[in-house]
Image (cartoon, rainbow, N blue to C red):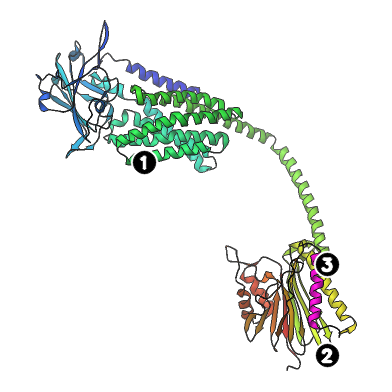
Amino acid sequence: MKKILLILLFLISSLSLHSEDNHKIYSLIEVCDDSGCRSTRWWVKDDFQEYYLNSDFSPESSQWIPIDKFPIWLNKLFKIKEDLHTYTILYDFDLPPNFLESISTPGIGFSEIGEAFEIYINGNLIASEGIIKDGELIYHRTVRGVTYHIPREYLNKTQNRLLIKISGNPNYDHTGLYFTRDYLIGDFDSISYSNRDFLSLILTGIYIVFGLYHLFLFFKRNKDRANFYFGFWAISIGVYIYTRSNLIFENPWDSIAIQKTELFVLYPMLTSIIFFFEELFFQDISKPGKIFGFFTLVLSLVTPFLPIHFSEILLLVWQFATLILGIPLMFYRLIQAIRLKIPNAKRILFALIIVSSSAIFDILDSMVFNTGLSFTKFTFFVFVMMVMFILANKLVELHNYTEELNENLEKKVEDRTKELNETLNTVNELKVQQDGDYYLTSLIIQPLGLNLNKSKSIETQFYISQKKKFLFRKRNGELGGDLCVTGNLRFEDINNRYTVFFNGDAMGKSMQGAGGAIVAGTVINNIIGKSARNNRILTDITPEKWLKGAFLELNNIFKTFNGSMLVSGVLGLICEQTGRMIYFNAEHPYVTIYRDGVANFIDSNMYMRKLGTEISEDFVLIQYHLSPGDVLFIGSDGKDDIRLGFDKQMNEDETLFLRNVEKTEGDLNELVQVLRSTGEISDDLSILKISYHPLNPT
């Protein structure tokens, strides 16, 4: 950084040395001799007449206003309510001794002049800028640091007259001679060189390149938003400095477009640096910062569409808002960072004090002093170097840390590998224990879900696939809460045999669901076992009362779990001789009947709540008469919970199962294959198929 500063100082000094060669340049606004310096007198009139160009014309009348001090603001001297008006500025002068002999190419320089004008020397036109057509100013040229050639033959040693015919908007304060100094006559090349701000051009290039570099870093890693804000700020500063330099007026651009561009990039500059500090130190934008940012964004967006004199009003609004809110907010956030002992906050505060001091001067200069001096472009360079120093320190710290990591990498890898292996062994041990628990639990469930139906008229088939799969000691297993049970009971006499069936789904995944299935299977098998033991004939109870008793026993047992274990299910009886079926549905998927190639639901909207629910409700039995060839499908919600397509959307169409039954013509194995090919089954799946084929159909 020291080398860069030395290079910059060298450039400044070299440019300054050249500018000090000013013996061929003379001021038009003051005359200096051995007794001191005194202001010259200029004259201003709010119109223009051709006879003003005559050499014998004298402006010393009551209609002309004498001017002894710059700047010359024509809108303040004359209150004119028009959109365009023409004025005359006149100055009589004598050339310094030996001027024509010592100057090879005479020239005249203006630090600022606009908006449209013609410059005459002794009645001869030497320069014209701006275009007025049909009473409207269509090409604005408010220019700074311009130099115009004066033909030698136009000049006299004494009694020379400079006349400026100048036109512009009376509401716009840039109509006239806006700056307080540097209205010069002398050697053309010397004046031109003194007006060319090469240093601004160099700084502009540095800031824009540096800003683009940070934007590149942001686009590579957009989480680091501080890079975006700093890059935007640096580019804005670069563009702003270029629009404020004299070099831009060497291009034939409309000065209104130049000034609006200047204002467009000026307004959000302070916002972007505030956002940069907040992201750098706090990784968040404060509410006052957002409000100020929105305010400056609105100003920036409306500026291109407003007349230039309205834009001047907005500039004043922004200047006051910056002094009252923007700068205090910026320093407040920096002081917060210092109190939190955030690294580099003090360094940035020091550099920012320098930048802010120069920025305040520039704002006050544009509002009050009007000297045309601008220091922010130099102090900002100091700030940029400070940020580069901070970033370089971070890079060095990162490099040192990387070297340290490389030196100890092998040992750290060994230690880390050892830790990972120990953790992996622990996880494997826990996994083995867990799979062992799963395996033992699955062994308990297996004898509870048996197809013990021996009827020749009623055929029953199971398909059960639990969602949780595991491997224990080379044994594959599965665990879940789905359960199927069948058996046979006799009512009234030995020939009146019924097939009992149950399909249930316990609430919960893996172990929780398996626990519910164990309880449900134990109770169901116990009830069936007691009722069918030793070929018992149930003469003292009807099938309806037997189902109600089974429901009450199941429900009461699950109630003891206080809602932590619920079971949905269908429990029913089918008479072998008549095909009469009675059952209850405890919040289980609807029972499906497949008859004559068509599948339908039997019990849609007819079921009770899950077993174990505390809410009391009426017991509901559903009756249905089966015909020869009828096929029933009773399944858990796994048959409907299918994730479809590439986006894995959950199926919400209950009739999909009906269509699949029809598609497979009631074949259980094909039905399962179709379900799996339809999508991903996301839950335990159990299907109980019941086919009715009576030996002696009635």
**Mark 1–mark 2 distance (CA, rounded to whole Å):** 96 Å
Q: Are marks 1 and 2 in contact (CB under 8 Å)?
A: no
**Mark 3–mark 1 distance (CA, rounded to whole Å):** 77 Å
Q: Earlier in the sequence, mark 3 or mark 1?
A: 1
* Between 419 and 498, the one nearer to me in the picture: 498
Secondary element at image label 3: helix
Residue assigned mark 3: 443
Q: Amino acid at mark 2?
A: Asn
Left or right: 312 in relation to 64: right
Left or right: 141 in relation to 695: left
Q: Which residue lies at the image location 44% right of the left edge and 28% below the top edge?
A: 323
Q: Is residue 237 above or below residue 459?
A: above
Quadrant where the C terminus sits is bottom right
Q: Amino acid at mark 3?
A: Leu
Secondary element at image label 1: helix
Residue 302, numbered circle:
1
Label 1 environment density (alpha carbons within 10 Å; few <14, some 14–19, many ≥20): few
Q: Is residue 342 visible?
A: yes
Q: Amino acid at mark 1?
A: Val
Q: Which residues are magenta?
A: 542-562
Q: Earlier in the sequence, mark 3 or mark 2?
A: 3
Secondary element at image label 2: loop
